[in-house]
C-alpha cells in the first residue's frame, strides 16, 4: 500500500478513481458518484434521482436488501447513499480486513440494480413519508425553502427529494430509462478513503463499471444573480424559522475560501458576530448560525435563526445591523486569526471520520474536479487575508441581492415584512 496522499487515476474506460490512503487507518470507505441530481431534472420527473437512489438498494441481480444488510453489517460496516443537487452517490465503509465486501456491494448496487415495479412502489411509499417528515422538521425545511427562494426560476431551486405529486406518479419504467441514460460513463467516478490501495481500487472500478458506457454529461446553465426577494411560508410550529442570505461564488472561484471565512466570522461558533449580537446581547433567538451551500457554478451564504413570533422582525433587523457593521468597519483585531483557527479545527475534526472524509473527497471532486488533502485545505484557510474577506464581503453582502424566508404561524405583520427596512 502506498503512503498517505491523494492519488487520481482513470480506469481503461475513462472513469476517474480518486483515492486517499491513510496509514494506520482501521477502516476503508468506497464511494461511486454519479454526476446527476435534482438540478438535472425537468419538472415532470422532479424527485426521480432521489427515488432511484432509494430503489436500487432494494434488489440487484444477485442480492436483495436483506442480504446486503447481512453482508455489510457482518463485515463490520455500513451502507448508505445520498442525492444532492448535482450528484448522487453510493458508499460502503467497513473495517479494513473486510474492505472487499464494501467494494463488492457498492459496485453491485450501481452496476446491477433490478429496478422492478414491486421495489419501486415499495420505495415510493418510504420516499413520500420522508418528504412529509421533512416538512414537519422546520429547522431542516427552512434550508429547502431558502434555496427554492434564492434560485427561483432555475433548476437549483428544485429540492433534492422532489415534489410529492410528481413522485407519486413515477414508474419503474421512468427509473429504468433515467438509469440507462445517466448512470453511464462519463458521469461515473470512484472514491476511496482509509486503508485503501489505489491500484486495487482502480482495478475494481474498471472491472465493475467500465462496461457502463454510452452516456453524456448533463448540460447545465449557471444561475443569474437573483434580485432581492422575500417569502413567508406558514406552518404550525411555535417557533419561527428565519433564513437570510445572498448568492455567492462557484466551487472553482478564487475567493471560495474567503467566503467560508466570512461566513464563519458572521455566524460560526458562540464568539461569532451574529451569535453575540442577536442571541447573547439581546436574547432574541434560540439559535443562529451562518453556512455556505456550495454548487459547481454558484453558492449561497445564509444565516439561519429560530425565535418566537414577537422577535422575528427585531432579529432580522439586528442581524442586518451586524452584517452592515462588518461591511463598514471591517474585521476587529484578532478576529481573522481566531476565525481561521475555528475553521481549521472544524476541518480537522471532520477529517478524523472516514465517512466525512469520503464525503468531502467525492463532493469536492464532483463539483470542481479538485482533490485536496487536509493539509492543503488548511493551507488555503491560512492564506486568506483580511483584504480577501472584506473584498468578498463588499461583493456579496448587498441589500439588493438579499433573499429571506420566514417559516411560521400565520402573521400579517411578518408576511408583509419589507426587506428594504433593513439597514446594512
Image (cartoon, rainbow, N blue to C red):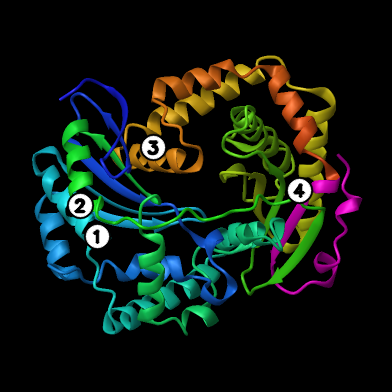
Categorize mark 2 by other alpha carbons within 10 Å: few (<14), some (14-19), many (20+).
Answer: some
Q: Which residue is mark 1?
A: 111
- CA separation in Å, label 2 and label 4: 41 Å
Tell me the quarter of the image containing the N terminus: top left
- Can residue 407 be found in the magenta stretch? yes
Mark positioned earlier in the residue sequence (1 or 4):
1
Mark drawn on residue 208? 2
Mark drawn on residue 225? 4
- In contact (CB < 8 Å): disc 2 and disc 1: yes
- CA separation in Å, label 2 and label 1: 7 Å
- CA separation in Å, label 2 and label 3: 21 Å
- In contact (CB < 8 Å): disc 3 and disc 4: no
Mark positioned earlier in the residue sequence (2 or 3):
2
Q: Which residue is mark 3?
A: 361
Give residue 292's quadrant in the image: top right
Residue 113 in the image: x percent, y percent? 25, 68
Segment colored magenta: 400-424
Q: Is residue 229 left or right of residue 79?
A: right
Is 283 located above or below residue 10 in the figure? below
- CA separation in Å, label 3 and label 4: 28 Å
Categorize mark 3 by other alpha carbons within 10 Å: few (<14), some (14-19), many (20+).
Answer: many
Amino acid at each position: 500500500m502506498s503512503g498517505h496522499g491523494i492519488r487520481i487515476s482513470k480506469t481503461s474506460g475513462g472513469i476517474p478513481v480518486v483515492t486517499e490512503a491513510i496509514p494506520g487507518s482501521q477502516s476503508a470507505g468506497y464511494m461511486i458518484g454519479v454526476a446527476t441530481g435534482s438540478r438535472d431534472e425537468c419538472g415532470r420527473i422532479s424527485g426521480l434521482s432521489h427515488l432511484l437512489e432509494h430503489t436500487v438498494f432494494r434488489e440487484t441481480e444477485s442480492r436483495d436488501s436483506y442480504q446486503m444488510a447481512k453482508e455489510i453489517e457482518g463485515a463490520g460496516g455500513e451502507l448508505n447513499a445520498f442525492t444532492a443537487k448535482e450528484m448522487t452517490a453510493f458508499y460502503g465503509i467497513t473495517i479494513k480486513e473486510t474492505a472487499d465486501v464494501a467494494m463488492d456491494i457498492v459496485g453491485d448496487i450501481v452496476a446491477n440494480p433490478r429496478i422492478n415495479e414491486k421495489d419501486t412502489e415499495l420505495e415510493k411509499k418510504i420516499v413520500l413519508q420522508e418528504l412529509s417528515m421533512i416538512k414537519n422538521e422546520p429547522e431542516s425545511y427552512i434550508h429547502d425553502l431558502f434555496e427554492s427562494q434564492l434560485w427561483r426560476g432555475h433548476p437549483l431551486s428544485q429540492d433534492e427529494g422532489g415534489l410529492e405529486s410528481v413522485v407519486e406518479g413515477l414508474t419503474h419504467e421512468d427509473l429504468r430509462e433515467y438509469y440507462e441514460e445517466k448512470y453511464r460513463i462519463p458521469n461515473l467516478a470512484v472514491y476511496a478513503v482509509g486503508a485503501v490501495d489505489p491500484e486495487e481500487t482502480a482495478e475494481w472500478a474498471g472491472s465493475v463499471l467500465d462496461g457502463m458506457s454510452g452516456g453524456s454529461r448533463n448540460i447545465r446553465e449557471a444561475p443569474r444573480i437573483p434580485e432581492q426577494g422575500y417569502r413567508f411560508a406558514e406552518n404550525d410550529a411555535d417557533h419561527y424559522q428565519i433564513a437570510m442570505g445572498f448568492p455567492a461564488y462557484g466551487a472553482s472561484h478564487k475567493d471560495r475560501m474567503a467566503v467560508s471565512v466570512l461566513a464563519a466570522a458572521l455566524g460560526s461558533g458562540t464568539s461569532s458576530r451574529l451569535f453575540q449580537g442577536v442571541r447573547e446581547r439581546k436574547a432574541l433567538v434560540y439559535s443562529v448560525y451562518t453556512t455556505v451551500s456550495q454548487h459547481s457554478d454558484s453558492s449561497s451564504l445564509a444565516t439561519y435563526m429560530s425565535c418566537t413570533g414577537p422577535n422575528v422582525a427585531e432579529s432580522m433587523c439586528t442581524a442586518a445591523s451586524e452584517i452592515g457593521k462588518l461591511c463598514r468597519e471591517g474585521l476587529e483585531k484578532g478576529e481573522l486569526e481566531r476565525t481561521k483557527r475555528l475553521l481549521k479545527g472544524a476541518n480537522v475534526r471532520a477529517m478524523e471520520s472516514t465517512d466525512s472524509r469520503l464525503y468531502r473527497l467525492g463532493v469536492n471532486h464532483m463539483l470542481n474536479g479538485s482533490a485536496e488533502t487536509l493539509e492543503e485545505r488548511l493551507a488555503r484557510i491560512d492564506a486568506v487575508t483580511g483584504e480577501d474577506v472584506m473584498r468578498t464581503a463588499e461583493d456579496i453582502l448587498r441589500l439588493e441581492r438579499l433573499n429571506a424566508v420566514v417559516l411560521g404561524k400565520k402573521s400579517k405583520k411578518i408576511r408583509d415584512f419589507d426587506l428594504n427596512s433593513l439597514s446594512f
